[in-house]
Amino acid sequence: MKMKAIRYFGPKDIRFEEINVKEPEEGEVLVKIKAALTCGTDVKTYKRGHPVLIKKIPSGFGHEFAGEIVKIGEGVKDFNIGDRVVAANSAPCGECFFCKKGEENLCENLFLLNGAYAQYITIPKNIVEKNLVKIPENLPYELAAFSEPLANVVHGISRTPINKGDTVGVIGIGPIGLMFCALAKLKGAKVIAMGRNPLKLKLAKEFAGADEVIDLKKYDDPTEIILSMTEEKRGLDVAIECVGLPEIWERMFKLVRRGGTVHLFGGCASGTSINIDTKRLHYDEVNIISVFHHTPKYFREALKLIAEGKIDVKQLITKRMPLKYAKRAIEMHGNGEVIKVLLEP
């Protein structure tokens, strides 16, 4: 059986091709993709490659999707043909050093699944067993496809010390940053959203319910205006970075109060580093956290939040395009012309 798919050959080289569908082997299932979404990680991969996400070339591309099971390999017990499902892009092994410590997101055998930008995708056994989930009947595929990106944010927010009434600032309000704003609001925080893109600034209010929105284009140094919005002008209780640039990481430490927390969520390019004022870090007791990826627990929590309507992710789909235009969709995402593009196979 043949299918149309986007294949990754290297930075800025993705191709729309006809390829063979991989038949499901033991423990695997074949899913007909009903909805796939563009992602900031895919944008980074498209621009510069990705040592973790892409292990060999050519490779399938894209990792946020939902669809319907059309074939089942031997030994699959909990799923049937016709099931509506969403899959995470990985699953922990459960046996390595980190899995045994309960740090499944750091699993040493974390195989990352690519290939969402296609008509079909074969889900490997480990993901079928641990991170393939049935979608509630009333939940559209396009909304269920947000489970993977939201799972990262649910993980991140769960490990961030946010109390009711805290002031939380989020810099970088792409899809991930907007979801951080929304979840911080659910925890009862006052949220300050910061970015440069008019569409994203608008959605920070309409989607995430941010209390304050700062257009960073208006300020050479926004530190003073940010501090003025905090209690006694002392600084943010929590500052969350969702850009992934070393120079932005460094600026975050100016924005938090003594005893505050800096959450460096945006992944920077390999080989980069930052400078930190050690006096500020030590004597002001500034906490640093940096959360990577998700786990089966957070993947299911994300799907539940979507299904219950607590996070209205539909607002984040600002463009729909046929699969063959995936390259243009990725470029539009990277340029800030859209929040997310729904690619329809």
Image (cartoon, rainbow, N blue to C red):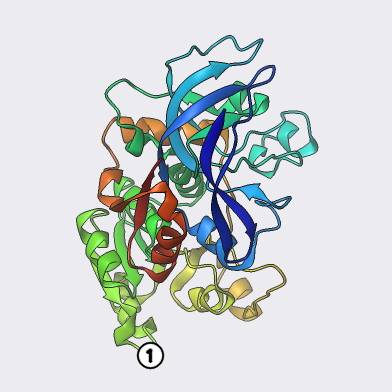
Across and down, in percent, residue 278 comes to: 65, 78
Q: Is residue 234 above or below residue 297?
A: below
| Residue at disc 1, secondary structure | loop
Across and down, in percent, residue 92 comes to: 67, 34
Along the horizontal axis of the image, is 19 left or right of 55?
left
Q: Identify which residue is drawn at 62% across, 65% down.
A: 11
Q: Quadrant of residue 8?
A: bottom right
The amino acid type of the residue labelled 1 equals Asp
The residue labelled by disc 1 is 220
Total of numbered circles in the picture?
1
Q: Quick one: label 1, few (<14), some, or many (20+) residues within 10 Å?
A: few
Q: Identify which residue is drawn at 31% across, 71% down.
A: 230
| In-front residue for pair 209/108 | 108
Q: Quadrant of the N terminus?
A: top right
Q: Is residue 301 above or below residue 227?
A: above
Along the horizontal axis of the image, is 80 left or right of 313?
right
Across and down, in percent, residue 232 comes to: 31, 74
Q: Quadrant of the C terminus?
A: top left
Q: Identify which residue is drawn at 51% across, 13% down.
A: 79
| In-front residue for pair 330/280 | 330
Q: Quadrant of residue 208?
A: bottom left
